[in-house]
Image (tube, rainbow, N blue to C red):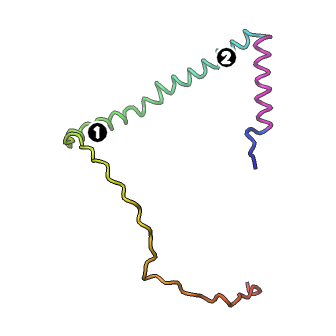
Amino acid sequence: MRRRAIHPLVGLMILLGTLGIVYTLFAHPTVLFRQLLFVAMFVAAIYLFYRFVYQRRFDKERLSYLKAVRQSKKLHPRSGRKQPKPAKLKRPLKKRTATPHLTVIDGKKGKKKNRASF
Protein backbone atom coordinates (compact mmCIF):
# COMPACT_ATOMS: atom_id res chain seq x y z
CA MET A 1 0.00 0.00 0.00
CA ARG A 2 1.41 3.38 -1.03
CA ARG A 3 1.66 6.10 1.57
CA ARG A 4 0.65 9.63 0.65
CA ALA A 5 3.55 12.07 0.56
CA ILE A 6 1.65 15.13 1.81
CA HIS A 7 -1.66 15.43 3.58
CA PRO A 8 -4.19 17.21 1.32
CA LEU A 9 -4.71 20.07 3.78
CA VAL A 10 -0.97 20.71 3.99
CA GLY A 11 -0.74 20.70 0.20
CA LEU A 12 -3.66 23.14 0.00
CA MET A 13 -2.00 25.48 2.51
CA ILE A 14 1.28 25.41 0.55
CA LEU A 15 -0.59 26.10 -2.69
CA LEU A 16 -2.51 29.04 -1.20
CA GLY A 17 0.66 30.46 0.35
CA THR A 18 2.47 30.25 -2.97
CA LEU A 19 -0.43 31.94 -4.76
CA GLY A 20 -0.48 34.70 -2.12
CA ILE A 21 3.26 35.36 -2.50
CA VAL A 22 3.02 35.45 -6.30
CA TYR A 23 0.00 37.79 -6.14
CA THR A 24 1.76 40.11 -3.68
CA LEU A 25 4.90 40.06 -5.83
CA PHE A 26 2.98 41.41 -8.83
CA ALA A 27 0.38 43.58 -7.06
CA HIS A 28 2.42 45.12 -4.19
CA PRO A 29 6.15 44.36 -4.52
CA THR A 30 7.15 46.94 -1.90
CA VAL A 31 4.91 45.32 0.72
CA LEU A 32 6.44 41.92 -0.04
CA PHE A 33 9.94 43.38 0.21
CA ARG A 34 9.10 45.01 3.57
CA GLN A 35 7.70 41.74 4.93
CA LEU A 36 10.76 39.78 3.81
CA LEU A 37 13.03 42.43 5.33
CA PHE A 38 11.13 42.23 8.63
CA VAL A 39 11.43 38.42 8.70
CA ALA A 40 15.16 38.65 7.93
CA MET A 41 15.68 41.19 10.74
CA PHE A 42 13.75 39.00 13.17
CA VAL A 43 15.83 35.92 12.29
CA ALA A 44 19.03 37.98 12.57
CA ALA A 45 17.99 39.25 16.03
CA ILE A 46 17.36 35.71 17.26
CA TYR A 47 20.71 34.56 15.83
CA LEU A 48 22.61 37.43 17.44
CA PHE A 49 20.92 36.78 20.79
CA TYR A 50 21.91 33.13 20.61
CA ARG A 51 25.44 33.90 19.44
CA PHE A 52 26.37 36.62 21.95
CA VAL A 53 24.20 35.95 25.01
CA TYR A 54 23.17 32.32 25.20
CA GLN A 55 26.36 30.76 23.85
CA ARG A 56 28.66 32.75 26.17
CA ARG A 57 27.29 30.88 29.16
CA PHE A 58 28.51 27.59 27.80
CA ASP A 59 31.84 28.97 26.60
CA LYS A 60 33.17 29.11 30.17
CA GLU A 61 32.37 25.45 30.69
CA ARG A 62 33.86 24.57 27.31
CA LEU A 63 37.06 26.51 28.00
CA SER A 64 37.55 24.79 31.35
CA TYR A 65 36.98 21.42 29.68
CA LEU A 66 39.52 22.18 26.94
CA LYS A 67 42.03 23.30 29.57
CA ALA A 68 41.59 20.02 31.43
CA VAL A 69 42.08 18.08 28.19
CA ARG A 70 45.32 19.93 27.45
CA GLN A 71 46.63 19.23 30.95
CA SER A 72 45.69 15.58 30.64
CA LYS A 73 47.53 15.30 27.32
CA LYS A 74 50.64 16.81 28.92
CA LEU A 75 50.54 14.24 31.71
CA HIS A 76 49.92 11.28 29.41
CA PRO A 77 51.76 11.89 26.14
CA ARG A 78 51.23 9.47 23.31
CA SER A 79 54.25 7.46 22.29
CA GLY A 80 54.27 8.37 18.62
CA ARG A 81 51.86 7.11 16.09
CA LYS A 82 50.59 3.58 16.16
CA GLN A 83 51.84 1.36 13.40
CA PRO A 84 49.01 0.21 11.18
CA LYS A 85 48.45 -3.50 11.48
CA PRO A 86 48.55 -5.52 8.29
CA ALA A 87 45.18 -6.70 7.11
CA LYS A 88 44.30 -10.08 8.52
CA LEU A 89 43.58 -12.87 6.13
CA LYS A 90 39.91 -13.67 6.04
CA ARG A 91 39.24 -17.21 7.05
CA PRO A 92 36.20 -18.99 5.73
CA LEU A 93 33.37 -19.11 8.21
CA LYS A 94 32.97 -22.44 9.93
CA LYS A 95 29.66 -24.15 9.61
CA ARG A 96 27.85 -24.40 12.87
CA THR A 97 27.25 -27.93 13.93
CA ALA A 98 24.68 -29.15 16.37
CA THR A 99 26.19 -29.53 19.80
CA PRO A 100 26.18 -33.17 20.92
CA HIS A 101 25.13 -32.49 24.51
CA LEU A 102 21.78 -30.95 23.53
CA THR A 103 18.89 -33.25 22.73
CA VAL A 104 15.29 -32.64 21.76
CA ILE A 105 12.71 -33.87 24.23
CA ASP A 106 9.46 -34.98 22.64
CA GLY A 107 6.48 -33.59 24.45
CA LYS A 108 2.84 -34.58 24.47
CA LYS A 109 2.14 -33.93 20.82
CA GLY A 110 -0.85 -36.20 20.46
CA LYS A 111 -2.81 -34.89 23.44
CA LYS A 112 -5.20 -32.01 22.61
CA LYS A 113 -5.77 -29.21 25.11
CA ASN A 114 -9.24 -28.59 26.42
CA ARG A 115 -9.97 -25.07 25.18
CA ALA A 116 -13.13 -24.75 27.26
CA SER A 117 -11.14 -24.47 30.48
CA PHE A 118 -9.44 -21.22 29.48
Return the x and y of residue 78 as percentages of the image width and height.
Answer: 21, 42
Q: Secondary structure at mark 2?
A: helix
Q: State whether residue 41 is above or below residue 97.
A: above
Question: Left or right of 60: which side holds 84?
Answer: left
Return the x and y of residue 75 as percentages of the image width and height.
Answer: 19, 42
Q: Is residue 17 magenta?
A: yes
Q: Which residues are magenta?
A: 8-27
Identify the amino acid type marked 1.
Val
Label count reads 2
Label 2 crowd (10 A; few <14 / some 14-19 / many >=20): few
Q: Image point 43% across, 81% down: which residue?
A: 100
Return the x and y of residue 76 as percentages of the image width and height.
Answer: 21, 43
Residue 26: name its quadrant.
Answer: top right
Circles 2 and 1, Cβ within 8 Å, touching? The answer is: no
Q: Image point 75% across, 13% down: which residue?
A: 25
- Gap in Å between the C-alphas at discs 2 and 1? 45 Å
Dominant secondary-structure state across the stretch colored magenta: helix
Return the x and y of residue 64 as percentages of the image width and height.
Answer: 32, 36
Q: State whether residue 107 is above or below residue 55.
A: below
Identify the amino acid type marked 2.
Leu
Question: Left or right of 58: which side holds 4?
Answer: right
Q: State whether residue 18 is above or below residue 24.
A: below
Q: Earlier in the sequence, mark 2 or mark 1?
A: 2
Residue 15: name its quadrant.
Answer: top right
The mark found on residue 36 in the picture is 2
- The residue at the far top in this view is 30
Quarter that holds the C terminus: bottom right
The mark found on residue 69 in the picture is 1
Of residues 68 and 15, the one drawn nearer to the viewer in this rendering: 15
Of residues 63 and 83, the one drawn nearer to the viewer in this rendering: 83
Of residues 99 and 74, the one drawn nearer to the viewer in this rendering: 99
